[in-house]
Image (cartoon, grey):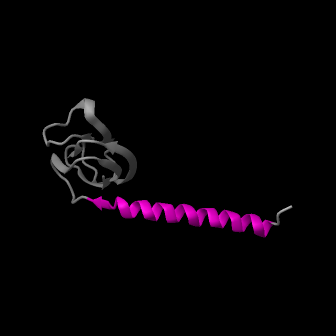
Amino acid sequence: MASLGDILTTQKNGVVAINNIFQALSALNPTVTSATVTSSTLVITGSGRLLSFSVVVAGSANGLIHNSGTPSGGTAANALVATPTTVGVYAANMVFTDGLVVVPGTGQSINVTYSQG
């Protein structure tokens, strides 16, 4: 029967291996945080993953983040996530294929963190 020390060492080795894999993948797809967006903005074109977004200024209406390659291409059909009127950092983990268009709500300021590729 394995001792508690053996079990904990095995668990530690598993965590170290997972961290190493994550770091290797992060090197291939580095993360980027956009400048603060206060009006409808095309942040990036191409494919990637929207990792999170930050509502810096709450505003008085929700905004949207779209999967679109053009600033005017944001529609209900390609909306990835709504941005709430509460200041904070929100995990998204959403894949985009065309680009990221951020449309802040009235008075909102938003940053997005994404990886491209």
100 sits left or right of 86 in the view? left
Q: Can the viewer see residue 11 in this picture?
A: yes
Rendering coords of residue 117 (x, y %):
30, 52
Image quadrant assignment for residue 114: bottom left
- Magenta residues? 4-33
Q: Quadrant of the N terminus?
A: bottom right
Q: Can the viewer see residue 83 in this picture?
A: no
Q: Is residue 9 magenta?
A: yes
Rendering coords of residue 41 (x, y %):
16, 48
Please name whichever residue, 10 or 61, is drawn nearer the observer in this view of the structure. Answer: 10
Residue at position x 25%, y 30% from top? 76
Give the answer, above or below, for where 13 lies relative to 53: below
Image quadrant assignment for residue 66: top left
Residue at position x 35%, y 43% from top? 95
Image quadrant assignment for residue 12: bottom right
Rendering coords of residue 47 (x, y %):
27, 46
Rendering coords of residue 67 (x, y %):
26, 40
Residue at position x 20%, y 54% from top? 37
Q: Is residue 90 magenta?
A: no
